[in-house]
Image: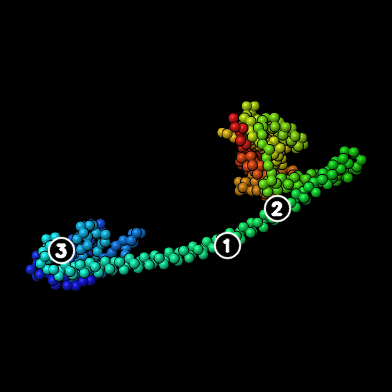
Amino acid sequence: MKTTGLINIIPSELQERIQTVRYEAGEQLIHRGKATPFYIIKSGHCKVYVLNSEGGEVLLGHLGPGDAVGEMSNLTQRKSNAYVVSVTQIDLFVLSEDQLDELFEEVPTFGRKLLKQLCLNLERTNAKLTSKVDELIELNANLETIVGDQVADLKEHQTILEEQNGEMKKIVASRDEFMNMVVHDLRSPINNVIGFSELLVETGSTTPESRKMLEIISKNSSNMLALINDLLDYSKIESGKLELECAPLSLLGHVDHIISSNQILYDGKGIFLNSNIPENLPVVQADERRLAEILNNLLSNALKFSSRGSSVELSAELNGEMVEICVRDEGQGIAEAEIPKLFATFQQISTQATEGEKGTGLGLAIVRKLVELHGGKVWVNSTLGKGSNFCFTLPCVSK
């Protein structure tokens, strides 16, 4: 960007009439976006910058004695798209339009030298732009290579995952098939054991000692049968093979039946069981059999952790477009830290059943799955030492 001699070809008598200005090192003598005077550097040096698309500085070049500054924007009557900062103390001629016209008329070589400087400036700028374009082309090529490699890696990983997923599905299917076979094969003989042991007890033809042993056999067999039934249900739910048979259902009559079927168990432990179901409660959309399973699980859970003389209540109320059903007990309650474990499979909490009753570890997990299949949600509010309130929702029948 250097064309020396512009000062030397300006007549001395005209130089004496041209205004001069001085800037100290680091001062900005041309501002971006503003009108610019026509300068010729008498002494000192400066740097020319432009801003890139990201707002960063790009150095276009250095200017020194004899160079014109701001000539492009001045001659085109446009605001500067660059800015110029002095490197050292710099003295400048400031030419007016009349003085420029006088120079072009009286000193033809001034115009030629100025034009040569403009051409050199454009060549330098074009070279820098070309270099940047080449850098961008190379960067784009590198990015395309990287992206291509990553796409290939992703496709390879996708293929591997699909193969592994296929193998996993086969393993799960084999597991489910095996579990169903085992469950079905075990259910009949266990039912026989329960039936024969109860029959022997009822006939009264046993000694007290053998009667006690038969009761233990019957109880343990019943626990095993409950586990088998839970495993079968959970396996069906997890494999997506459990289909609900939902229909409009009145909770009032259904709950009365559930209360009656659980009453003997509650009476045996001396716990009061009651219900509070409003007569005007809307009809719900539910699978009657699976709803009974949900309620029986929750009532069995409440019975297990309640002490003699306490109460358990099954209630329901309308909550928006859902019916909220709750089983509240006055039992031992659950520590807050253990509540997240309640609806997971095979999770045991530190709270012990009041009379040593055993569970399968699947009851509440099945409750959660069945409630979610109905389009509802389940939760619990509990205070340690004060009891628990298990609640879930079911959708009302659309009118």
Circle number at residue 165: none
Front-most of residues 266 and 225: 225
Residue 222 lies, in percent from the top left, at 79, 44
Q: CA distance from mark 2 to mark 1?
A: 26 Å
Q: In which quadrant will I find the C terminus? A: top right
Task: List the single residue furthest toward the top.
Answer: 279
Front-most of residues 119 and 336: 119
The residue singled out by tag 3 in the image is 94
Question: Which residue type does callout 2 highlight?
Answer: Ala
**Counting other residues with Cα less than 10 Å from the Cα at mark 2, is it few (<14), some (14-19), or many (20 or more)?**
few
Question: Which residue type does callout 1 highlight?
Answer: Glu
Q: Secondary structure at mark 2?
A: helix
Residue 195 lies, in percent from the top left, at 84, 42
Q: Which callout, 2 or 1, points at the residue further toward the start of the chain?
A: 1
Q: Secondary structure at mark 1?
A: helix
The residue singled out by tag 2 in the image is 173
Residue 84 lies, in percent from the top left, at 24, 64
Question: Which residue type does callout 3 highlight?
Answer: Val
Seen in the picture, residue 222 relative to 109 is either above or below; the reply is above
Front-most of residues 204 and 228: 228
Q: Is residue 350 in view from this perspective?
A: no
Q: Residue at x 59, y 32 (%)?
A: 398
- The mark closer to the camera, 1 or 3, is 1
Q: CA distance from mark 1 to mark 3?
A: 68 Å
